[in-house]
């Protein structure tokens, strides 16, 4: 019974936090996108490509963590 309650709490934390965190990420990505406006900002193309590359690398890291979690559950040891 206690284990079920613990899982419910974990699920609730996830469902409470996910929309907040994802909306924050999307908001900040839009703000980064606003920086492409050359009327308001001065930058080299290489600088903006570095920003996009760093964002992409972080997203790939998150995807790798998810894949590692999924693979961990699927593995069964055999002799």
Image: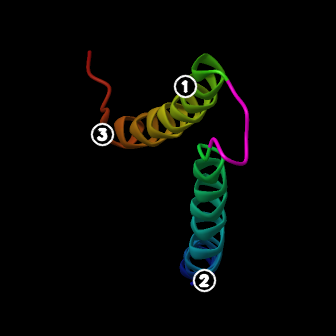
Element marked by disc 2 = helix
Which element is circle 1 on?
A: helix
Residue at image coords 60%, 81%: 12
If you read the primary sequence from the N terminus, does the residue marked by circle 1 or circle 2 appear first? Answer: 2
Q: How far apart are marks 1 and 2 (CA)?
A: 41 Å
17 relative to 76, above or below: below
Picture disc at residue 43 = none
Q: Distance between the residues labelled 1 and 3?
A: 31 Å
Position of residue 61 in the picture relative to residue 24 (left or right)? left
Q: Mark 2 points at which residue?
A: 5
Q: Nearer the viewer, residue 28 or 39?
A: 39
Q: What stretch is highlighted in magenta?
A: 38-43
User: What residue does disc 3 label?
Assistant: 74
The residue wearing badge 1 is 53
Q: Where the C terminus falls, by quadrant?
A: top left
Mark closest to the chain's N terminus, 2 or 3: 2
- Choose top left, top right, bottom left or bottom right for residue 31: bottom right
The image quadrant where one finds the N terminus is bottom right
């Amino acid at each position: 019974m206690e284990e079920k309650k613990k899982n419910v709490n974990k699920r609730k934390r996830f469902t409470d936090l996910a929309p907040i965190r994802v909306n924050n990420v999307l908001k900040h990505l839009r703000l980064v996108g606003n920086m492409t406006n050359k009327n308001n900002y001065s930058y080299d193309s290489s600088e903006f490509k570095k920003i996009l590359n760093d964002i992409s690398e972080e997203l790939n890291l998150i995807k790798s963590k998810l894949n590692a979690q999924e693979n961990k559950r699927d593995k069964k040891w055999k002799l």
